[in-house]
Image (cartoon, rainbow, N blue to C red):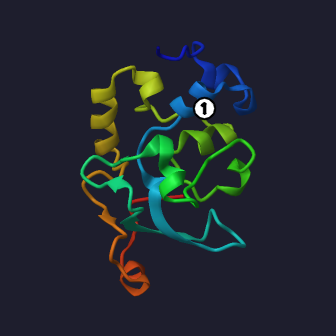
Amino acid sequence: MAATLRPQFWSRFALSELTHPEWEALCDGCGSCCLIKYIDDDDAEALVEYTDVTCQLMDCATGHCQHYATRQEYVPDCIQLTMENLPNMMWLPSHCAYKRLYKGQKLPSWHLLLTGDAARTEQQMRAANVGVAGRCVSEVGMTDEEMEERVVTWVQP
């Protein structure tokens, strides 16, 4: 049974008032949070470098986690974004709905919650250069030195 989402919940309620299904629906599925990144602990938003290297669970062809619901069983330190830790995650990409709403901004025009059309959203995300599908590599078998050479600029905090 599909969860019921309140109409335009993202603009009518504070993030802290969202139900679990509403919170999950904010995710655009870009996969950028799954990229390995180098973060300056003093200024995470300004000083973050993303690589094109992803967690071992990422399907790099689709840009989706292969075990999203149980990901922390496989990768214990996998990001679990919550209202409580969101203020410490300003390294998230600039298009991230969680970050945007937290900062009082609107959802990107291509977001699924606005378009209601998954194919259209996917097409517009590609046009906006958003998402890891088709342009990431797995961390499996990669050394730290190899990862450091894979910094990209197509993700902006």
Query: Looking at the image, which is closer to me, 52 or 140?
Result: 140
How many numbered marks does the figure carry? 1
What is the quadrant of residue 122 in the picture?
Answer: top left
Q: On the picture, is 72 further left or further right than 136?
A: right
Q: Which residue is mark 1?
A: 23
Classify mark 1: residues with Cα within 10 Å, few (<14), some (14-19) or many (20+). many
What is the quadrant of residue 136 in the picture?
Answer: bottom left
Query: Which residue sits furthest front?
Result: 73
Say which amino acid is labelled 1. Answer: Trp
Q: On the picture, is 153 further left or further right than 47?
A: left
As drawn, 155 above or below 66: below
| Residue at x 53% of width, y 44% of height | 96
Res. 24 in view: yes
As drawn, 60 above or below 28: below
Residue 89 in percent (x, y) is at 65, 55
Query: Looking at the image, which is closer to me, 33 or 110?
Result: 33
| Residue at x 45% of width, y 44% of height | 68
Quadrant of image for the C terminus: bottom right
Residue 29 in percent (x, y) is at 42, 41
Res. 93 in view: no
| Residue at x 62% of width, y 66% of height | 46
Which secondary structure, mark 1?
Answer: helix
As drawn, 23 above or below 102: above
